[in-house]
Amino acid sequence: MSVLRTAALAARENAYVPYSHFAVGAAVRVGDRIFSGANVENASYGLSNCAERSAIFAAVSAGYSKLDELLVIADTKGPVAPCGACRQVISEFFGPNAVITLANVAGQSVQTTPQALLPGAFSKGDLNA
């Protein structure tokens, strides 16, 4: 089992999901460092945070803004897909061809890229238009 998958599965165990009961874990690699995160729900649903963003924000909070690889995992029929907000955040902190692995607890996975997840993503270049 890969280091990222192990970290994402462990993070998933800490998901706070009293409303949806849909636990998700994610792990980010930056060089040889791993940052993980779980989804955290809130009674005010809009204030919830996805696992992908939790892991990415942990890496960014530690001083990294160029991330190398992401794995996200959930108990889904096929590999779990990131929501739109997570796709936008992924496009901000990963290069367009970075490895993004979408997985499920049954062992299925697919690799993709930020570019494939969100073609035409809004970027800081758009702010200077």
Image (cartoon, grey):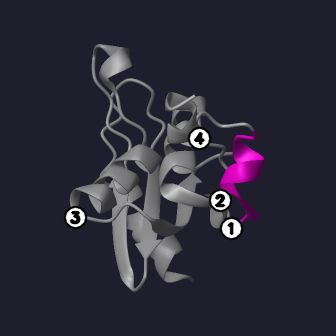
Q: Which residue is mark 1?
A: 107
Q: Nearer the viewer, residue 69 or 37?
A: 69
In the image, is residue 26 above or below residue 92? Answer: below
Which label sits in the foreground, 3 or 1?
3
Neighbour tally class for label 2: few under 14, some 14-19, many 20 plus, Cα within 10 Å: many
Q: Which mark is residue 62?
A: 3
Q: Which residues are magenta?
A: 107-119
The amino acid at mark 1 is Gly
Q: Residue at the left extreme?
A: 62
The amino acid on which the numbered mark 3 sits, given as a three-letter code, is Ala
Tag 4: amino acid: Arg
Q: Position of residue 64 (x, y in %)?
A: 32, 65
In the image: residue 54, left or right of residue 113: left
Compare marks 3 and 2 and give the one earlier in the sequence: 3
For marks 4 and 2, give the one nearer the viewer: 4
- The residue beneath circle 4 is 87
